[in-house]
Image (cartoon, rainbow, N blue to C red):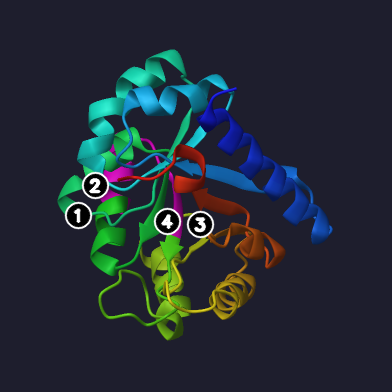
Amino acid sequence: MDTTTQRYNDVMARIEAAARKSDRSAADVTLVAVSKTFSAEAIAPVLQLGHRVFGENRVQESQGKWPSLKQDFADTSLHLIGPLQTNKTREAVALFDCIETLDREKLARTLASETQSAGKSPELFVQVNTGNEAQKAGVQPDEADSFLKTCRLTYNLNIAGLMCIPPFDEEPTPHFSLLAEIAERNGLAKLSMGMSGDYEKAIELGATHVRVGSAIFGSRG
C-alpha cells in the first residue's frame, strides 16, 4: 500500500470516528481533498481510490490539470476554495462545481450575471472572516446576515452554506461555533470548516465539509 493510500485511509477513518463521537453519520461529512499545487500524477491515486471531491485554490492552475482528469473521472466534483477575482468568474463557473469563497457584493453581482449567461450555477458558499483578520478574505461576522440577504434577494443566488478559515494561531472552536450560529439563523445546512490540523474538531461542531490536503497528499515542500 503506497503512502498516499495509507494517508487517505487514515483521514477517512478519523472522519468516521469523529462523526461517531458526535452521534453523526460519516456519510454526512464530505471530504474535500485539497489538491492545490499537486500535479495530476499526484492526484490520480486518490481518484483511483474512488474519491471524487477535490479542492483547488486558483482557477488558472485548475484549468491546467483538471479538464484532462475529468475526462477519465467525469463524476468528480471540484471546489474552488481560494479567493476568486471577478475577472476569473466566467472560467470558474465553467470549471468548478462549487465555489466556497463568495465574499463581496461585486463578486455576487458578477456570479449572478455569469451563471445566467452560462445556464449553469455552481453550488455557492459564503466565506466568513470569523477572526476579523485584515489580511484575510471573507465577510465580517457582523455583516454576514446582511450580505446573505443581498445575495439571495438582490442577486437571486442560491447560497448552500458557509465557509471559514480560523486564524492559524488560535483555538478553532470559537470560530467553528460562530460559523454554525450564523448558518443556523440563516437557514443554511452546509458548513465548510476544518483543515488537516483541526477537521475532527470541526466535525464535532457540525462541519458538513472538511478541507484536507497535506494529511492526504503530504507536504507541499
Which quarter of the image is occupied by the N terminus?
top right
Q: Which residue is mark 3?
A: 195
Specify the amino acid type for callout 3.
Met
Residue 134 lies in the magenta stretch: no
The answer to which of marks 4 and 2 sits earlier in the sequence is 2
The answer to which of marks 1 and 4 sits earlier in the sequence is 1
Which region is colored magenta? 112-125
Q: Which residue is mark 2?
A: 89
Q: Residues within 10 Å of mark 1 (few under 14, many from 20)?
A: some
Q: Residues within 10 Å of mark 3 (few under 14, many from 20)?
A: many
The answer to which of marks 1 and 3 sits earlier in the sequence is 1
Give residue 63's quadrant in the image: top left
Q: Which mark is residue 155?
A: none
Please state which of the two labelled residues, at mark 4 or mark 3, is closer to the viewer. Answer: 3
Q: CA distance from mark 1 to mark 3?
A: 26 Å
Give 92 or 28, whichever is nearer the viewer: 28
State the residue lying farthest toward the top: 72
Specify the amino acid type for callout 2.
Thr
Q: CA distance from mark 1 to mark 2?
A: 5 Å
The answer to which of marks 4 and 3 sits earlier in the sequence is 4
State whether residue 28 appears in this view. no
Residue 114 lies in the magenta stretch: yes
Q: Secondary structure at mark 2?
A: helix
Q: Which residue is mark 4?
A: 157
Q: CA distance from mark 4 to mark 3?
A: 27 Å
Look at the numbered discs 4 and 3 and tell me whether their residues touch, using CB distance below 8 Å.
no
Residue drawn at x 69%, y 49% is 14
Q: Secondary structure at mark 3?
A: loop
Q: CA distance from mark 3 to mark 2?
A: 25 Å
Q: Is residue 90 left or right of residue 152?
A: left
Look at the numbered discs 1 and 2 and tell me whether their residues touch, using CB distance below 8 Å.
yes
